Image (spheres, rainbow, N blue to C red):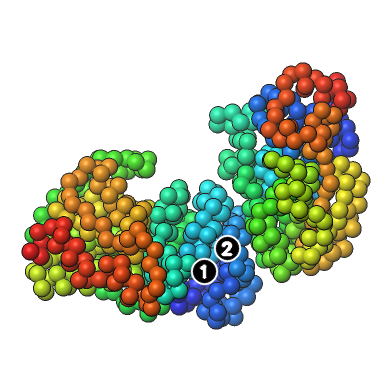
Amino acid sequence: MRNAFARVLTELAPKQTDLVLLYADIGNRLFNDLKGIAPERCINTGIAEAHMASMAAGLAKEGLKPLLYTIASFTSSRNFEQIKVDVAYQNLPVTIVGTGGGLSYANLGPTHHTFEDIALMRSLPNMQVVCPADANELTELLPQILASGRPTYLRIGKKNEPALCSTFEPNKLSKQEGLLGRVSHLKADTDGDSESKAEPISFPGEASSKVCLGAMRYMRSGADLLVVSTGVITGLALDLAEVLADKYGVQATVVNIHTIKPFDKRGFASLVANFETVLALEEHSIVGGLGSLLAEEIVDNEWSCRLIRAGLPDVFIDQVDSRESALEKAGLTVDALIELIKRRTTLCA
Amino acid sequence: MHSAKNAYGEGLVHRMAYDLVRLSQATNTPHLASSLSSVHLMAYLYWREMKLQGERDRFILSKGHAAAVHYTVLYHRGYISEDELFSLGANNSRLEEHSGVKAPPEVDTVSGSLGHGLSVGTGMAYAAKLNRSGKRCFVLMGDGEQNEGQVWEAAQHATVLGLDNLFAIIDCNKWQGTGRSQDITNLEPLDERWRSFGWAVERVDGHDLSGIEAAFDSLKNAHGQPKAIVADTVKGWGVSFMADDNNWHYRIPNEKEVSQAAEELGIE
């Protein structure tokens, strides 16, 4: 996905002359094409992430649109305060790109794991939080993020993430496998967004497999279980859905929340009434990420449904040779998730 | 009275120092001594050095707790009214104890968290080079602030970028929150430290207007290098019972102390 990022940025740079890339001594050769076009707009700040974030704020104050790039944990946890004060508080058009979110760098140990970034970043007012699931989503979302002119944390993968396909067909939704079109009313107005006050949601409404910033993306439809995921681990959500269907006759709707913040409250409200169980899946701590976000929504709106939060457990994962081994330790495999579903529900009985 | 108030010189500095003392008392705002130590430097920058119109220079008060001296300067330069100055710290005031996003447009960035300002300034100075705007950026820091590692991240980078339109002014009043700066982090010789980072450096008496001017003048010849002025100042300058007394980092004067200050500063 980092190659896709470099490619899209290089494509946009000639026309969007306000784009400036800052990187913290990482991305050897990754940005060679961009440097060829606009060397003065590629700034190596050295291994100085705090400085990089505040410097970006200074550039943005003078009308530029900076993007920061380094490993996700180093431009979320490490320089969080600079992002909070100089970027988020001043509401500046800075795009913070963290590569290798989750366990992409599993074998490098917890110093290179990013399991806390979504929790941190969504706690910042003004901050958009976006986790594309594959290179195609990144390609679609990056220009939209830049056009929004808002501070954004963009968590991307590293490399070789499989391209994901949506099998969702909107025109078949009303006839699909028993989806009843019941809606949940939004009760809570916890973020001061007056548009979301207790209004009926029309379902299926704008349900779509298109990649639009701020809208949830429908990957698969099914009546028995709602799986909500974010980022690269959406691939696992789709694998899980396939096995559930083939082996257990359980049909899952899979929805991909690439935009964690601002969260598609109406989209989620339109789904939640139709399912007894929601499974949240993320390559992030179960503390504070997508699962926590859904828990907040469900509790605030007093909806009754079962929420199963699958993510990285509250432990440091070390001594692993690969992301696959780490995900296995973390219980993020199809088999482990099915066991989880069996423990918490009567599906797959 | 208006023109006499604004005429550059020791008179102006004394007047602003007095305004700082009475402002602290009237609005119950601490950090008076930190504002007093910067009063000559601020006067020089805003009356002699910085371009204030058109593609104006940028000023960053990185030692953000001295917001009062920034606002006092803006008042004396006619950007805000006296009423507004004395609204410092009130509900819905544009003037907060640390400048925020609601501050007047002459305030170029938020401050209050130490160590950020030079990085922000590096960004502004670099943008000015990219945009060919000719703007310069002046960043006022404290000596306590030199503790923050981020200051040195910016210092090391600014030289690589050759930002000769970036000025770091360090108000060395010898104190920080809980004690003498030298005792806490052994920062001397500070001018040598900046020089070792590749900056063009002058060290001056921070209360000598002509000395400050001469220092900026000699730095004009440094091309391709960012510039640092290390200014030796007195925390709580101008008032005998505040000078070099770190209690005045937080302490707020009472009305009697304000009168005594007026007398010492030669204000009627």
Residue A113 vertical position relative to residue B76 in the rendered view, above or below: below
Q: Mark 2: which amino acid?
A: Glu
Q: Residues within 10 Å of mark 1 (few under 14, many from 20)?
A: many
Q: Position of residue B50 (x, y in %)?
A: 79, 49
| Residue at image coords 77%, 22% | B258
Q: Does the rendering let one see residue A148?
A: no
- In this rendered view, identify the residue nearer to me: A15 or B130: B130
Question: In the rendered image, which quarter contains the N terminus of chain A?
Answer: bottom left
Q: Amino acid at mark 1?
A: Thr
| Residue B247 visible somewhere in the drawing | yes
Residue A47 x/y as whole percent: 60, 68
Q: Quadrant of residue A24?
A: bottom right
Which residue matches tag 2?
Answer: A49
Up/down of B20 relative to A163, above or below: above
Q: Dots 2 and 1: beta carbons under 8 Å? A: yes
Quote the CA–CA distance across marks 2 and 1: 8 Å
The circle drawn on residue A70 is 1
Q: Pinpoint the chain carrying mark 1.
A: A
Depth order, front residue of B70/A245: A245
